[in-house]
Amino acid sequence: MVRAIRAQLKTEKLTHFTQQPLIGRFEEITLPLVAKTNDTFVIRPLAFQQQNATKMMDHAQTWLGRFARLAQNDVLKTQNILLPLQGPTNTNPKLTGAFFEVSREFEQLGFYTIPHHDTKAISTFAKQALVADGFALQH
């Protein structure tokens, strides 16, 4: 997913998103698509193709915790994070239900989530990182 998004942004001449570390109070997280323009913006694709719902939820909690700590330490604003999400390919109701739940959790905490193939939303977000008054994704 990162490779596809990077290629898309390069094609659109939106090359301000690069791999960079974000340094919080206690941790340093290197993310593949970070722009430090008028603020710090992150595109972090996440795949939820784990084989059971517990692992899927654990994966979501890891990223929720990381982003929450960066936001609490004023390193990153939650509204400046775009999460293209790839759900399970398996149609197991437990897995699809868990994916719906983790998507909802990200959104409740103020993160923008989109389907990983929504190239229009990715472009809009990347362009907004260049605008002085910030970003507001239209749902």
Image (cartoon, helix red, strand yellow):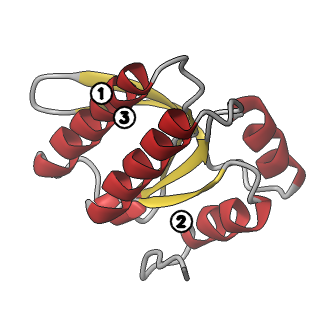
Q: CA distance from mark 3 to mark 1?
A: 5 Å
Q: Residue placed at 74% from the left, 55% from the top?
A: 14
Q: Residues within 10 Å of mark 3 (few under 14, many from 20)?
A: many
Question: Which of these two is toward me, 44 or 28?
Answer: 44
| Callouts 3 and 2 close, C-beta under 8 Å | no
Image mark for residue 60: 3
Q: Earlier in the sequence, mark 1 or mark 2?
A: 1
Residue kind at label 2, given as amino acid type: Ala
Q: Residues within 10 Å of mark 1 (few under 14, many from 20)?
A: few
Identify the residue under disc 2: 129
Q: Secondary structure at mark 1?
A: helix
| Callouts 3 and 1 close, C-beta under 8 Å | yes
> Residue 2 location in percent, x, y?
68, 33
Residue kind at label 1, given as amino acid type: Thr
> Residue 61 location in percent, x, y?
28, 33
Furthest toward the right, the residue is: 11
Q: CA distance from mark 1 to mark 2?
A: 25 Å
Q: Residue placed at 63% from the left, 50% from the top?
A: 16
